[in-house]
Image (cartoon, grey):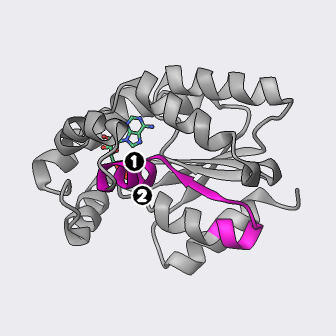
Amino acid sequence: MRLVLVGPPGAGKGTQAVRLAERLDVPHISSGDLFRANLRDKTELGLAAQRYMDAGELVPDEVTVGMLRERLAEDDVEKGFILDGFPRTAAQADALDELLRDAGNELDAVVSLEVGEDVLVQRLLARGRTDDTEDVIRRRQEVYREETAPLLEHYAEQLVTVNAVGEVAEITDRIVDVLGPR
Ligand code: ADP
């Protein structure tokens, strides 16, 4: 199963991706986690990404695509994946399309998690990550609307939408239901 999760920051992509990875037995690949691991290890890539992350801006596509290309070349990805946080721009989506095409694969579905903006800001403020201050959160929402929301059209054919307000377990069930037997 090859899945992409999309949704604004705070929609619960990470939470749901972990649960889906377990249910579907495929690796969970989170661009944010990959960046944070690079930051922790003080790699060149991590240092290059830091100022963008701190400001709630997107890391430049070349850096992001390079990082994901490497991750998607690892062996465990052969059985599928759940992508969380990538792609986030049209250029990233094009790069992913090309990678998949070259490997003779395609996405099974793109799952859009739908949550209203006020709920999002409340959830993120409660989470308390260092880049979760109100200004940075609002900037990430803006970037989502401008850069990432248009991807929903790019993926119109594979798109399924899920109401992501409710209990965590209930939302996982909704996603699994909407994916149906594949
Ligand atoms: P959130 O979904 O709450 O914004 P993430 O952990 O997905 O949090 O991302 C944190 C930060 O990492 C983003 O604000 C951005 O700077 C960077 N980032 C993550 N994914 C991408 C991506 N696909 N392209 C560019 N930057 C990214």
- Rendered view: 63 above or below 170: above
Mark 1 and mark 2 in contact? Answer it, CB < 8 Å. yes
Q: Nearer the viewer, residue 40 or 118?
A: 40
Q: Residue at x 33, y 32 (%)?
A: 59
The residue sitting at 33% across, 36% down in the picture is 44
The residue beneath circle 1 is 8
The x and y percentages for residue 172 are 61, 71
Q: Amino acid at mark 1?
A: Pro
Main secondary-structure element of the magenta-colored stretch: helix
Q: Which residues are magenta?
A: 20-40
**Residue 80, numbered circle:** none
Q: Position of residue 47 (x, y in %)?
A: 26, 39
Q: Is residue 32 rendered magenta in the image?
A: yes
Q: Image check: 14 left or right of 179?
A: left
90 falls in the magenta region: no
Q: Which residue is mark 2?
A: 11
Relative to 122, residue 51 above or below: above
Q: In this picture, is 126 found above or below 43?
A: below
In the rendered structure, the answer to whether residue 59 lies left or right of residue 136 reads: right
The x and y percentages for residue 104 are 86, 29
The reply, left or right, for residue 63 in relation to residue 174 is left
Q: How many marks?
A: 2
Mark 1: C-beta under 8 Å from nearest atom of ligand 1:
yes
- Look at the numbered disc 2 and give the secondary structure of its residue: loop
Amino acid on which disc 2 is placed:
Ala
Dot 2 crowding, Cα within 10 Å, few <14, some 14–19, many 20+: many
